[in-house]
Amino acid sequence: MTQDLFIRLPDDSQDDTVSFSFNGEPLTAAKGMSVAAALLANGKHVFRHTPVSGAPRAPYCMMGVCFECLLEIDGVQNRQSCMTSVAQGMHVHSQDGGKDLSGQLINSELEENAQ
Amino acid sequence: MSDRVDVVIVGAGPAGMTAAIKARELGAKSVVVLDEQTSAGGQIWRNIEHASRKISTILGPDYVAGAKVASAFRKANVDHIDGAMVWNITQDKVLNYVRHGKSYELHAKTVLLCTGAQERPFPIPGWTLPGVMTAGAAQVLLKGNGVAAAQPPVLIGCGPLLYLLCWQYLRAGIRVGAILDTTSARDYLQAIPDLGSAIRGWRYLKKGIALISEIKKEKIPFHRGVRDLKLSGDSHVSSVEFQCRGTTERIDTNLVFLHQGVVPNTQFTWALRAKHRWSEKQLCWIPDVDETGQLIGIEGIYVAGDGRGIVGANAAVYQGELAAVSALTKLGILSRRKGDDAIMHIRKKLSREVAVRPFLETVYKPQDENRIPVSDSVTVCRCEELKAGEIRQFVAEGCQGPNQAKSFGRCGMGPCQGRMCGLTVTELMARELGCSPTGVGYYRIRAPIKPITLAELATIEEFPSS
Amino acid sequence: MSTVVVGGGLVGSAIAYGLALQGETVTILDEGDVAFRASRGNFGLVWVQGKGDQHVQYASWSLQSARLWPRLAADLQRDAGIDVCLQQPGGYHICLSDDEMQERANKLSRIRENLDQPYDYQIYTASELKRILPEIGPDVVGASHTPYDGHVNPLLLLRALHKAAIVRGAAYRPNRKVLQIKHSGSSFRLETDSGDSFTTDKLVIAAGLSNRELAEQVDIYVPIKANQGQVLIGERCKHFLSAPTTYIRQTNEGTIQMGDSMADMGLDDRTQNEVISTIARRAIRTFPILGTLNLVRAWAALRIMSPDGLPIYQESRACPGAYVFTCHSGVTLAANHAYEISRWVFEGEQPDAARTFSNARFMEHSSS
């Protein structure tokens, strides 16, 4: 698809912009948006590939019910991106297949990173 | 063991906020609202406290009406815990929730479940393709994020929310590619008997008619009585095919919004082992409650709002009040006489609000073929990628119900915990077994009501006192 | 000659399958969809290690079944077209304290001493174990291992047994809970809750928790109680655990299964926070990477427990031709049930190895 599917409507509010990355690519979004909305607004259409068959998936319900919007966010895999607010410096990656436990940081390392 | 909280409310939508306001007003000492979202409003009034004026104008007066309730909620001095995901609830009114990576336990004297509704699944060929979303998703993008379609989307299905979305998009200056309405003339005819009671809700009908005529004025392609829906594409949706008035038609599109009504979120009530009945009219499970919303057989736990049957925001508000009044009467905080008076009063207002429902339910009854896939190749369980044909095969091999279907093929065992496939599986198996959905039942739902991590489960702290 | 098997769980369907394989006319009577199905709460281990410490014949019975298991898996693949994903790479019992390690070593040593056949096992220190299972955490002290252990997909197993039995000629009648058994002469008449009745020469009662009351009607004493097992199931993950362990295993489709507690409960199959918190903590101590694992489901399944935890296999003395078979490890013993137990019913000859599981061991000590 060459055209964007979604745009952020220009409006009267002066929301701050945050910078974050998706699969290493630097992107920006208005503060307060969900990660899922931020990615859709930035033209990202496929979020993950299923662990069962590798089928491409993207958000369906945007309200935490369908579990299609799963992404790796700041080192933690399989997070519902529609239920997570985008934040400055966030690192987001597509979720390809099941969770890679060995490739993921454990809780104590995540806590350290957060500090 | 900490003291029990007078009233714990799950959900901060119309019902939840109103119940909280009422409970405090009537004298409850402690009211805690556990809200999964980061700010109050639920789904219909999502982000009401932060929405820009422009967005509010686009969304319309029903949305803006929520601002008053949200403001009263804020002033009511209740303990609003945002980002709290409830994963367990017992009949003994003990709740567990996760917030910011930690798990807590809360003991209540009364619980009000105001967890609302979700979109009805729409299992048609291609519905799992990227670029296919629900009308509700489109509204979340608009309300919560100020994001709208950049290409003309195709809206498919039936029901007031579909037309509302189209109307909101028009106000935002965004073109809608087409509306494929699955409602047919026959549906209108069948709804005539319900028209009588609908007239009591004439304001609602008037609103709907005005909405539809505005849409028609814009000359958006509007196809009625659409059948045989099929979404196609490789790694993204690229077109929709359908039958209309005897001809096959096709529209190229990269964005589809599906909607065929909303259904109660019953995960909590099933987890509580509450009794449910299958409603042939609403085509979903409804928890058994008394006139004030208390679960039959479970003392002190109420359901208010869309969670006890789809009624809309205005009715949800009254149900929230009803539950709060009943709860406080039972707690002895409100006198029996005052309580009974108030209940009678509220129920009168409530019956006016729900008068139009039977009519809407009949007119906008989702078509059989869009609830029970005709084609065997349609994905029913999105998480575990099970197709309709495989589930039919389970039945042929002796599978008796949804819980056995889990054993047969992991159907319903993925992260969504049956939310996207439960209704489809119940109806599909009932059809194959030649019995009613009541006979077939529903998935056994247990804690965790939503997935939580092991680390979040490993230590459960007592509810922090504010 | 015909046999009715009461109960379509793991025990009943394994026996029914075995009978069908031998050419017997079999009817399986099963309850409905939400029966207190112990079989659906099974962990899936085909486990030998540590069993039979107080009763060595149980160790040999388990070993025998583990050895017969590949045959069962192959037969099910052939007859049902279902691969139950049997893997027998050996299993680990991971220890989180020195006391646990010592107790483990002692237990296995005792079993080896009492057994009249070879009993292979190894004790690993933490550093040795780390080379095999690199993901173990710093709290792990070591583990015991035997080559006999394995695991299988328990839900696929149940489905495969049903299907294979039917393919081999068994009749499967669901929604028929047996309410009454009447014995007259050499035949049995069963009344079910759907209104119909069945008459048969041979009767196998394998109805899990209903065994006690049903067996009473053919004069067999079966002192079983409900025992609650808890299983937590995590999301699908990329494979990291190549062998099963006593409390944690990764299934063929990648989900992580954790359990199991042995709390004595009544007929309440609700999960308990304290128990599942304990399981979660143990899992994280064993494999710290499980901390971020999303828990998708938690079972609290009721299991069948006899006073000594061992199977009860008994033919009625007053009504010969009626049998009851009940056990806790329906998965491990499925192979024995399919071949050894079914042969007992078919030919009327009790296998020696099964004699020790007679209910006589309870009647000597029973009061009243």
Image: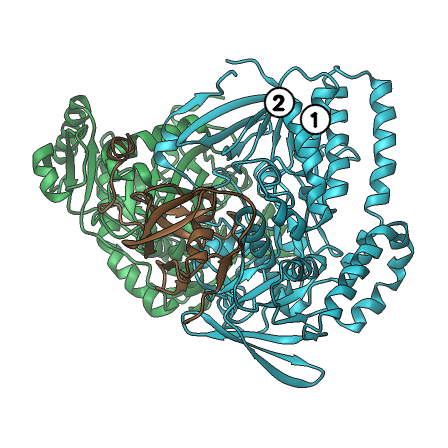
Quarter of the rendering containing residue B3 = top right
Q: Position of residue C80 (x, y in %)?
A: 39, 67
> Circle 2 — which element?
loop
The residue type indicated by label 1 comes to Ile
Which is more toward the observer, B67 or A82? B67
Q: Residue at label 2?
A: B78
Disc with the residue nearer the chain's start (2 vs 1): 1
Q: Position of residue B414 (x, y in %)?
A: 44, 52
Chain A appears what colour? brown
Whether residue C307 is visible? no
**Does residue C366 appear to the left or right of B112 in the view shown?**
left
Q: Position of residue B387 (x, y in %)?
A: 49, 67
The chain that appears cyan in the image is B
**Does residue A109 appear to the left or right of C2 in the view shown?**
left
Chain C appears what colour? green
Q: Residue at label 1?
A: B21
C138 is higher (above) or lower (below) than B411? above
**Does residue A20 appear to the left or right of A83 in the view shown?**
left
C233 is higher (above) or lower (below) than C195? above
The residue type indicated by label 2 comes to Val
Q: Position of residue B265 (x, y in %)?
A: 61, 45
Identified at 70% across, 85% down, the residue is: B246
Identified at 85% across, 49% down, the residue is: B355
**Does residue C173 appear to the left or right of C335 in the view shown?**
right
Around disc 2, counting alpha carbons within 10 Å, would you say few (fewer than 14), some (14 to 19), or many (20 or more)? some
Around disc 1, counting alpha carbons within 10 Å, would you say few (fewer than 14), some (14 to 19), or many (20 or more)? many
Instruction: For mark 1, name the chain.
Output: B
> How far apart in space, not on screen, are marks 2 and 1 (Cα)?
8 Å
